[in-house]
Image (tube, grey):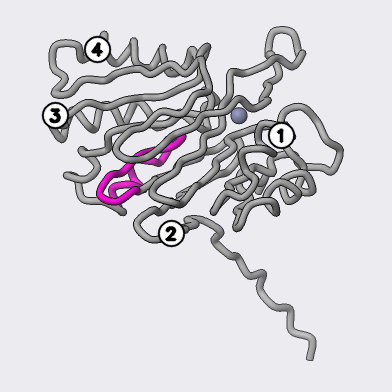
Amino acid sequence: MNKKQPKQVISKYPIRWAKKNFSIKIFCSIPNIATGILLQAGKNHFLIDPGDGILRDINKELSAEKVAGISDIFITHGHHDHVGGVWSFLTYLRVVRKSDRLNIYYPEGCVEIESIYSAFSKVYAKSTTYQITLKKISKHTTFRTKDVAVKPFPVIHKEISIETGKSRVVPALGYNFSFNDTRICYGGDTAYCEALVRNAKDADLAIIEAGHDDDTPDDMHMTMHEAISIGKSAKEYFLVHVPE
Ligand SMILES: [Zn+2]
């Protein structure tokens, strides 16, 4: 008898990877919907590209005290699927009485982060419990925060202008995070670019977007083939931001 099998639905996210005391959890990475990544190095936690849903996801993962202790946010670019959760996260930290500083790293020219910060400051200037420091990245030099060495690098990302219908460049970064002797490379959203090729090579983990939905290369996202070719140069890799 030919009984039709129900379609198996496999939940791809979350994806977790860990080596020694260094781990990363990708709660979500769906183009145009949301990204959300938690990085842990020893006792310290960091957010990367907190898109919509990040508050729900980290609260399942960490105690309120640990969420309040998150010290740094790394933004690759200002598209809504990468920054949609920033407002609620900043507001939540105030509600749970965060007391230490929060750093937000973002590419120079990313007006979305500066605008969210400006609106937050305007609304809550007199009632915040913690300080926010915006760390605009204009040079791609390595810096350290909480024992993690962070190396930002420029990537190539674009969007279609609603006014003109033409594509325009979006300020965009990838990041290398190194803790002890382990390195994680996250490329953010990018077309195939040499900076990502260089930075992903020999990483312990590379997180590579494959957001282009056909096999003809373009200047916004990578095809599956391009993403795999870069991923394979790392020791392990995840393909993310794949259209669903
Ligand atoms: Zn994007």
Whether residues under marks 4 and 3 lie with C-beta atoms below 8 angstroms apart, the answer is no
| Measured Cα–Cα span from mark 4 to mark 3 | 18 Å
Q: Secondary structure at mark 1?
A: loop
Q: Is residue 6 magenta?
A: no
Looking at this rendering, what residue extends furthest in the right direction? 216
Magenta span: 41-60
* 150 shown above or below 131: below
Residue 89, above or below 22:
above
**Which residue has dot 4 on it?**
123
In this image, 69 relative to 198: left or right? left
Please report the residue visible at 21 percent of the width from the left and 50 percent of the height from the top.
63
Q: Give the image location of residue 191, x and y in percent.
A: 72, 32
Foreground: disc 1 or disc 2: 2
Q: Can see residue 157?
A: yes
Residue type highlighted by circle 2 = Ala
Q: Residue 221 — which label?
A: 1
In the rendered view, would you say 229 is above or below 101? below
Q: Is residue 141 above or below residue 61?
A: above
**How far is disc 3 from disc 1 in space, using C-alphas?**
39 Å
